Amino acid sequence: MKSGVCLSLSSLVDAGSALIYMFIQHVLIFLFKWPPPPGPEYPKSPKGRIAIIGAGVTGISSAAHAIAHGFDVVIYEQSDTVGGVWTRVNETSGLQINSLLYRFHPAVLWSSSFPSRDEVVHQVRKIWEEYHLEPRTRFNTPVKSVRRVKGTGLPPHGDPSSPRSRWIINDGEDGIFDAVVATWIIPRNVVVGALIAGQPAGREWPIWLTWQKVITWWNYRDVPELVPARIGLFETTPIVNDEFAKVVKSGKCRYVRGDIVRFTNGGVRVKVRRRQEKPGEGKAEREYAGDLVVLATGFKRPPFDFFQDELFPKGYDGPNLYLQGFSTEDWSVLTTNATFQHGMGSVGHVHIGIYMRILFTFLMDTKTRPTRQEMKLWVDIVRFIKRDAPGGAFSFFTYTELSASLVVHFGFL
């Protein structure tokens, strides 16, 4: 009887949590979702034209924000479908963080706290269809060149009386654009939560050194051999997975640090490294037997060689960009999530819409447009503030830092 009562209470708690979760999402949709255009022919008199490179989470979200605010877009996608890298992962893949932190667009409605790949792709496609982006998408169209229209651009490149760039994508078949947004996203979605992402300035303050040790102990207290010897918590992107640590602790999985020598008929031969040794320093060779090899090597960041070199000069190339997204040479070039290296926070969250609104502001109000000197000064100031950051001034960023930068920027507009 007691077991039945406990089971019923547990079911009631789960049902109540699900209702609260759905209620929160509907409130967010009501408050922040902008209505889609009434038809694919809108807007008839756009405020501007924006080229979006990539039809993944970031690209579709950026395009939907633009359409909803009266801008026309053209989306360039090298594959034959929307969804980006999410369409190229295993169907069992899913979010490792709560989906409330992965609301890449206000219209998103998750059915669970940790949705799988198929649901993520479904939400991307839903927004793509709802905001009439299908006729504006060019599939199987890799971007090979992004060229500034001759005679346009910030001084001294163009006419000082008209300091605004115009852009041509590839052969110019889709006309001239007022701005270009290059997007990308990694579907790993790391983060322990807001506590980790709350590092305020990326620097090793004494309190954060203590906090780093607490977090490390909490997550790896039973498997200390998994903790990297030379890389700190605020230096690279951690992959947080409670189940993996449990599997290693139980002995069902062996974690081996090493450099792969070659595959053999019976498995794989590895130069084993101790925890303190760097890659390449392993000396003792061992062969590990196995019937199946899984190559879990992740994704390679796509190159930006279609942009002109002058847009990303040495010292001000990715990730050393204005507000971590805009080219310091031209504010009409935005690289949302495309220059991200390491950090803590969700790459699929509200900052996508905030970046687009900043771009809209630049396009519509000449008084808000920053000069090259102002954009580079911002980068230099952040470098100075984070000069002692172990992960680098821009190579490692937390979501709190990113949010603070955007909020402060809006305060000065």
Image: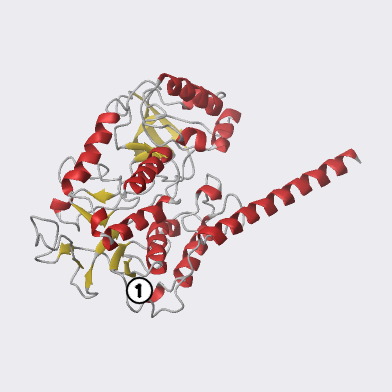
Callout 1 secondary element: helix
Q: Nearer the viewer, residue 345 or 247?
A: 345
The x and y percentages for residue 178 are 24, 65
Q: Nearer the viewer, residue 338 or 153?
A: 153
In the depicted structure, whether residue 400 falls above or below residue 349 = above
In the depicted structure, whether residue 283 falls above or below residue 396 = above
The x and y percentages for residue 232 are 39, 26
The x and y percentages for residue 388 are 29, 25
In the depicted structure, whether residue 31 falls above or below residue 296 = below
* Picture residue at 89% right of the left edge, 38% below the top: 2
Is residue 264 at least partly visible in the picture? no
Q: Which residue is mark 1?
A: 136
Q: Residues within 10 Å of mark 1 (few under 14, many from 20)?
A: some
The x and y percentages for residue 93 are 51, 51
The amino acid at mark 1 is Arg
Dividing the image into 4 quarters, which one contains the N terminus? top right
Q: Quadrant of residue 378?
A: top left
Q: Nearer the viewer, residue 161 or 402?
A: 161
